């Protein structure tokens, strides 16, 4: 029986699903499929935000709270009561997904819930997940086995008894210990008491597989001193879970070469992306690939033109054959025309016989999503000037119509219009949308911007500089300022900002690459100097030297 197929029995079905140790990318394909068909989602608070994005908008999430939300009220059932929630939903004929941190069999403690389903004849399945004891060492650069086939023992310090510690202590196996930060030293002491040498190396990883991950290398005998020297302990956060790996495989010399995750160029950097949410999406994905934590703050809002008649006439002109060309210079222009098409019941077929030009990769992608393949995209610089370089002059013999439809923003420059006229074309320059300053971000974000809580900010236009400063204030002087080009950099400097990074090309993706190169060089310089690798926001105000882009 396919557990995600419609259920024709009186009872529903339950999928016990492992959501992995924290990285959303570690969800399996099967997990995503199950989430997409769920009627009810019951998740551990730590992974609710990870799995909820793959569920339907109307999915029921009874009595759930994400890990960063306020604590659950006292009268709300705790995780000990999830079996009742699961059974109640299944009895009502619902498709239930019970999502747990890590793997259901190793981390989830859901055997009791599975037995309850079995006792009542409720169909259930188990979707394995990446267990924390396996995934976290992999992200820390600590292989658990090598060609010599060292044994691996998994220990949960909360339930381990004296016999367990002595057996592992007397062996030469790699030990993977699930414990808490303030209990690591006690676990190390148990292994030493069981027979392990105090100089046996270990690694301790907190917040594994997330961009908050931190790993310390020590020995069984020195781990308490190492964590104290790193000012990790004592701490109010000492109860947070960690994975400690004990054995020769976690030696510092080996981890230096294998620590692929924490060595990403922007690892842990909080990067401010002041664009509209739609524009920021692909840029944020790229930043995540560099290890950064993007924070999207819209600085402009897009609104319809105050007088829609001009846009309406132009769209009707597309259908009646008024234009030879239509040129899109932004995703917002594509969106504005598409919305007007849908308003009139039109689709991409209305572009038949019309040549289409697009500036920029994202604009071209938006057109393709609409069902239109651009006939002309700049071969060089992705700008109005780059488009003019490739635009053909009007030829009365080969061009039956001499008119171009140019839908654009109300604040767009006249470069493209003037260039097309010079090439012999008539241009209908139409305001397709207006850009206005967005509302200020929440107070917490404004304080982080002005107080140095962000490590970098990416400015993709002069308007993003002006609008961000206007709605949120000037970024702190420890924040790395990255600009897409000379005009944007000039505007930033006029607002008293020091520009650290300049994109080699007017492309948001090249800008992100340039910031990653800056971060990598900064990291290499710290390592070469024997200094700890820190983020810009961790430096003291006033201590920062001017950096070269």
Image (cartoon, grey):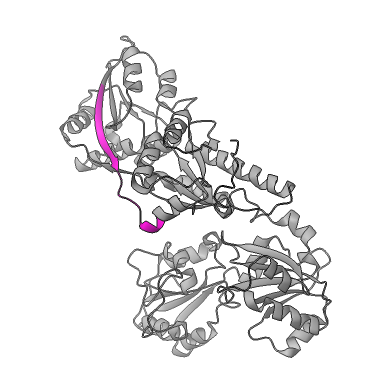
457 to 35, vertically: above or below: above
Residue farthest along the top direction in this orientation? 397
In the image, farthest residue toward the front: 542
Total marks drawn? 0
Q: Looking at the image, which residue is at 40% across and 27% down?
A: 375
Q: Does the magenta stretch include residue 443?
A: yes
Q: Does the magenta stretch include residue 361?
A: no
When the figure is inspected, residue 532 is found, relative to residue 160, above or below; the finding is above
Which percent across, then down, holds residue 42? 42, 75
| Quarter residue 166 falls in | bottom right
Residue at horizontal 31 percent and vertical 46 percent from the top: 438
Q: In which quadrant is the C terminus drawn?
A: top right
Near-viewer residue (322 or 61): 61
Using the rendered image of the protein, determine whether residue 144 is visible from the camera's viewpoint.
no
Range of residues picked out in magenta: 428-445
Report the front residue among 495 and 488: 495
Above-or-below relation of 356 to 454 = above
Q: Position of residue 152 (x, y in %)?
A: 75, 74
């Amino acid at each position: 029986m396919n557990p995600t197929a419609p259920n024709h029995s009186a009872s529903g079905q339950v999928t016990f699903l492992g959501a992995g140790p924290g990285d959303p990318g570690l969800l399996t394909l099967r997990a995503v499929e199950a989430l997409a068909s769920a009627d009810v989602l019951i998740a551990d608070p730590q992974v609710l935000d990870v799995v909820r994005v793959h569920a339907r908008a109307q999915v029921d999430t009874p009595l759930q709270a994400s890990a960063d939300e306020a604590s659950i009220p006292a009268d709300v059932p705790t995780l000990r009561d999830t079996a009742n929630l699961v059974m109640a939903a299944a009895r009502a004929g619902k498709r239930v997904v019970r999502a747990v941190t890590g793997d259901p069999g190793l981390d989830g403690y859901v055997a009791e819930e599975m037995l309850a389903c079995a006792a009542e004849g409720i169909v259930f399945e188990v979707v394995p997940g990446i267990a924390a004891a396996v995934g976290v060492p992999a992200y820390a650069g600590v292989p658990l086995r090598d060609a010599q086939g060292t044994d691996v023992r998994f220990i949960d310090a909360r339930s381990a008894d004296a016999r367990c510690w002595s057996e592992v202590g007397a062996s030469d196996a790699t030990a993977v210990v699930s414990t808490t930060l303030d209990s690591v030293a006690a676990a190390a002491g148990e292994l030493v008491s069981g027979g392990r040498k105090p100089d046996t190396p270990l690694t301790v990883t907190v917040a594994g597989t997330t961009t908050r991950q931190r790993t310390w290398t020590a020995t069984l005998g020195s781990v308490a001193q190492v964590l104290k020297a790193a000012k990790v302990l004592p701490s109010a956060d000492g109860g947070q879970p960690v994975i400690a790996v004990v054995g020769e495989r976690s030696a510092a010399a080996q981890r230096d070469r294998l620590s692929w995750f924490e060595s990403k160029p922007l690892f842990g950097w909080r990067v401010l992306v002041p664009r509209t949410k739609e524009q920021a999406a692909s840029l944020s994905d790229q930043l995540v690939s560099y290890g950064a934590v993007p924070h999207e703050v819209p600085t402009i809002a897009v609104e319809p033109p105050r007088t829609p008649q001009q846009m309406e006439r132009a769209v009707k002109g597309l259908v009646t054959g008024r234009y030879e060309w239509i040129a899109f210079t932004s995703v917002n222009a594509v969106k504005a025309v598409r919305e007007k098409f849908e308003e009139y019941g039109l689709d991409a077929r209305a572009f038949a016989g019309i040549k289409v030009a697009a500036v920029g990769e994202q604009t071209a992608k938006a057109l393709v999503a609409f069902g239109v393949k651009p006939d002309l995209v700049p071969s060089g610089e992705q700008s109005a000037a780059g488009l003019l370089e490739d635009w053909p002059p009007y030829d009365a013999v080969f061009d039956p119509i001499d008119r171009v439809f140019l839908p654009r923003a109300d604040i767009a420059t006249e470069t493209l219009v003037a260039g097309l006229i010079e090439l012999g074309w008539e241009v209908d320059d139409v305001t397709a949308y207006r850009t206005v300053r967005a509302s200020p971000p929440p107070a917490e974000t404004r304080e982080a911007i002005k107080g140095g809580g962000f490590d970098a900010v990416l400015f993709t236009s002069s308007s993003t500089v002006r609008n961000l400063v206007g709605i949120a204030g000037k970024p702190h002087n420890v924040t790395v300022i990255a600009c897409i080009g000379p005009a944007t950099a000039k505007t930033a400097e006029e607002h008293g900002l020091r520009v650290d990074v300049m994109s080699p090309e007017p492309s948001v993706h090249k800008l992100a690459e340039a910031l990653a190169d800056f971060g990598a060089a900064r990291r290499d310089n710290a390592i070469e100097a024997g200094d700890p690798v820190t983020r810009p926001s961790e430096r003291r105000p006033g201590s920062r030297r001017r950096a070269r882009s």
